[in-house]
Amino acid sequence: MLNVAREDGPPFHRTELGRLLHMLDVLASLPGVRAPEPISVRGARE
């Protein structure tokens, strides 16, 4: 499981979350790596 959080500052921007999801997709496409559950995004600001 991967958790990403900020203690200080504004909520994550939708662009930041999109970049993170893209990096996770790349990682999940590597041989021998699998995502144990679907990836979801909550709390994004527009």
Image: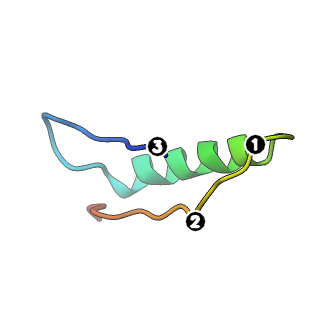
**Residue positioned 61% across, 46% down in the render:** 24
Of callouts 1 and 3, which one flags the residue occurring earlier in the amino acid sequence?
3
Residue at which label 1 appears: 33
**Spot occupied by residue 30 in the image (x, y as percentages of width and height):** 81, 40
* Viewer-proximal residue among 29 and 22: 29
The mark found on residue 38 in the picture is 2
Q: What's the amino acid at mark 3? A: Leu
Residue 25 position, x and y percent, is: 67, 51
Distance of label 3 from label 2 (alpha carbons): 12 Å
Q: Is residue 35 above or below residue 27?
A: below
Which quarter of the figure has residue 23? Answer: top right
The vertical placement of 3 against 7, above or below, is: below
First in sequence: mark 3 or mark 2?
Answer: 3
Which residue does the image show at 29% across and 49% down from the upper left? 12
- Tag 1–tag 3 contact (CB < 8 Å): no
Q: Position of residue 7 (x, y in %)?
A: 16, 35
Residue 2 is marked as 3
Q: Residues within 10 Å of mark 3 (few under 14, many from 20)?
A: few
Image quarter of the C terminus: bottom left
Q: Which residue appears at 86% of the width and 40% of the height?
A: 31
In the image, taking residue 27 as reference, residue 44 lies left or right, namely left
As measured in the structure, the alpha-carbon distance from the residue carrying label 2 to the one carrying label 1 is 14 Å
C-alpha separation, residue under disc 1 versus residue under disc 3: 14 Å
Judge by depth and name the residue closer to the eye, 37 or 18.
Answer: 37
